[in-house]
C-alpha cells in the first residue's frame, strides 16, 4: 500500500499575525522596562527620604547641643566666674596693654 502524499499546509501565521505578535512582544518589553525603572526610582526616592529624615534628626540634635554649649559658654563669661578663675590661677590684670591694629582690624602685639 503506497503512502499518502503529504499535504503541504500553508504557514499558519500570516505576515499580519507576525506583526501583531512582534508588536505585543515589544509592548510587553516596554511595560517590563517601565516597571523596572519605576521600582528603581521608587527605591531611590525612599532612600533619599530616609536620608533626609536622618539628617533632620541629626540637625535637631546638633542644635540642642549647640544651645547647651552656648549656655555653658555664657555662664563661663560671667564676671564672677571670670574673677574666680583669675584668682584660682593667680592671674594679674595688665596695667598698660599695647595692641596694634592692622588693616583687617585684628589686634596684634
Image (cartoon, rainbow, N blue to C red):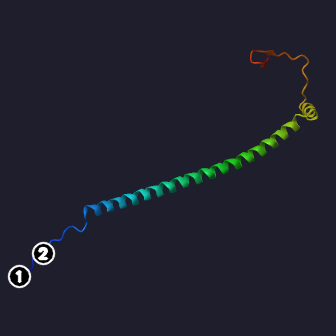
Above or below, 87 relative to 99: below
Q: Which residue is labeled 1 in the image? A: 2
Report the disc number at residue 16.
Answer: none
Residue 60 in picture, x, y percent from top left: 74, 47
Left or right of residue 6, residue 108 in this image: right
| Secondary structure of the residue carrying numbered label 1 | loop
Quadrant of the rendered image containing residue 14 = bottom left
Left or right of residue 69, residue 11 in this image: left
Above or below, 64 relative to 15: above
Dot 2 alpha-carbon crowd within 10 angstroms: few under 14, some 14 to 19, many 20 or more: few
Report the disc number at residue 6.
Answer: 2
Q: CA distance from mark 1 to mark 2?
A: 12 Å
Quadrant of the rendered image containing residue 71 = top right
Is residue 38 or residue 23 the one in the foreground? Answer: 23
Left or right of residue 64, residue 39 in this image: left
Residue at image position (25%, 66%) is: 13
Assign the N terminus to one quadrant of the image: bottom left
Contact (Cβ within 8 Å) of mark 1 with mark 2:
no
Is residue 92 or residue 97 the one in the foreground? Answer: 97
Residue at image position (78%, 46%) is: 64
Dot 1 alpha-carbon crowd within 10 angstroms: few under 14, some 14 to 19, many 20 or more: few
Residue at image position (35%, 59%) is: 23
Residue 47 in picture, x, y percent from top left: 59, 52
Left or right of residue 71, residue 24 in this image: left
Amino acid at each position: 500500500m503506497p503512502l499518502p502524499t503529504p499535504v503541504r499546509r500553508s504557514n499558519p501565521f500570516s505576515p499580519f499575525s507576525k506583526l501583531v505578535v512582534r508588536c505585543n512582544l515589544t509592548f510587553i518589553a516596554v511595560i517590563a522596562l517601565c516597571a523596572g525603572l519605576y521600582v528603581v526610582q521608587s527605591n531611590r526616592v525612599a532612600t533619599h527620604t530616609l536620608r533626609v529624615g536622618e539628617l533632620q534628626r541629626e540637625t535637631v540634635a546638633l542644635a540642642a547641643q549647640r544651645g547647651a554649649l552656648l549656655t555653658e559658654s555664657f555662664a563661663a563669661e560671667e564676671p564672677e566666674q571670670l574673677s574666680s578663675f583669675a584668682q584660682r590661677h593667680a592671674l594679674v590684670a595688665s596695667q598698660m596693654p599695647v595692641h596694634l591694629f592692622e588693616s583687617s582690624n585684628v589686634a596684634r602685639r
